Amino acid sequence: MNAKIEARNLTAVQHLFGLEGEPAHEKVLYISDPITSLRAIIAVHSTARGPAFGGCRMWQYSSDEEALRDALRLSHGMSLKNAMADLPYGGGKSVIIRNDRQLNRKEMFQAFGRAVQSLGGQYITGEDVGTTVDDMLAIQCASPYASGIPREGKFGGNPSPKTALGVYAAIERAADVLFGAASLGGVTVAIQGLGSVGWDLCERLHAAGCKLVVADIDSLRVNTAAEKFDAKVVDVRDIVTQAVDVFAPCALGAVLNAPAIADMQCKIVAGAANNQLETADDAQRLHLRGIQYLPDYVVNAGGVISCVREYEGGGDDASVDREVIRIADRTASLIDEAQAQGKSIASVAYEQALRKISVAL
Ligand SMILES: NC(=O)c1ccc[n+]([C@@H]2O[C@H](COP(=O)([O-])OP(=O)(O)OC[C@H]3O[C@@H](n4cnc5c(N)ncnc54)[C@H](O)[C@@H]3O)[C@@H](O)[C@H]2O)c1
């Protein structure tokens, strides 16, 4: 075997059982459907607490390795999220690698649905960045293991408003516990990303009297936010380092990294984006800078809570809201515990999540 082929095979074999530095998974399924040009990965991190529940992201990745890494990190995060929300589900996530040949979106999602079905209920999907309610309906043609779908006469559908509600509840409580803000009136919040969740969060914070600073790569969204919420618009490169009370990342992951943390000026980080920390060490970096980081998987669980209740067919809008708002109590108790133990909120939350997963084993 020549050296080039050998090197390529070695990489393939290494990837077969995960990537260095990423958590070990129970199962990883690679899907390729030549007819619809579907290329996807379903990662099941853990089914210790129940079937793996987590959305499907569609994204243009720069390499297959980047897609695999995203799937593995996101599905691990879902194990932590579902455990902290006390949901009887494990963690999983899927990614569809976007390409220009995917001309029939509905058929492609049906093909993806067949892959979900092949796991026999070990993985239940839903929306994430780049996927919609229509995509979930297409998956449902091939498999019942899909959520984020409006159920007749009931709640359901796009989970983003519930995610925003949970993030809002966490910010409100954290501001109260950490700096005695009896209300959010006058509290300054920088929001990165004005998509489904970020926009809804802006609406809630604006209604509560917050002063908003916003950034998005989409200029129409930021200009509308400036008009509607009297928000200050800043460049996307500057949003992380604004001198505000709260920074709310609501775009993509890895925004909390060593260079950014060195320049950050907020007191609290609480946002919807998954995997905000670039590395686990970044939680400690934030702690040492005195910035209170509320783990993403704790505060952004509103969407999965909504999807789970809708998927199970029980509950209603009001009961889901009550369950989502409990994220505020969870936030307060994590802050108390972290202060009592002299640890970061992130390390206390991580220990709790691991305990909840391991007792289920
Ligand atoms: N939708 C949910 O219910 C939910 C639940 C849990 C976690 N999340 C996470 O929250 C984040 C946002 O989700 P969403 O559904 O609102 O996604 P979305 O795609 O609707 O919105 C993302 C927004 O971020 C903007 N953006 C992209 N790159 C940016 C950059 N560099 N700087 C500033 N803005 C940028 C996009 O233009 C878009 O407006 C994602 O990380 C997602 O995984 C979402």
Image (spheres, rainbow, N blue to C red):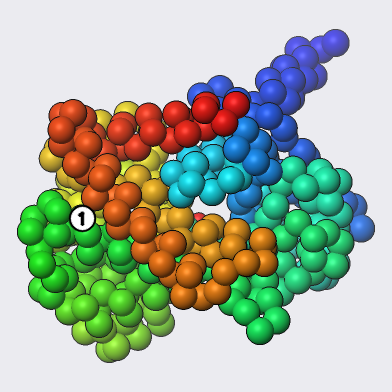
Q: Position of residue 10 (x, y in %)?
A: 72, 17
> Residue 92: horizontal and vertical position, in percent?
63, 43
Residue that appears at 21% across and 73% down: 212
Q: Quadrant of residue 341?
A: top left
Q: Is residue 11 visible?
A: no
Q: Quadrant of residue 138?
A: bottom right
Along the line of sight, which residue is nearer the eye, 139 or 354? 354
Where is residue 12 shown, x and y percent of the image? 74, 25
Neighbour tally class for label 1: few under 14, some 14-19, many 20 plus, Cα within 10 Å? many
- Looking at the image, residue 199 lies above or below residue 129: below
Along the line of sight, the residue nearer the viewer: 212 or 354: 354
Query: Which image quadrant is residue 353 in?
Result: top left
Which residue in the protein does label 1 denote?
174
The residue depicted at 39 percent of the width and 38 percent of the height is 278
Q: Quadrant of the N terminus?
A: top right
What amino acid does circle 1 point to? Ala
Q: Is residue 148 left or right of residue 119?
A: left
Q: Quadrant of the C terminus?
A: top right
Q: Residue furthest left?
A: 180
Label 1 lies in ligand 1 vicinity (Cβ under 8 Å): no
Dot 1 falls on a residue whose secondary structure is helix
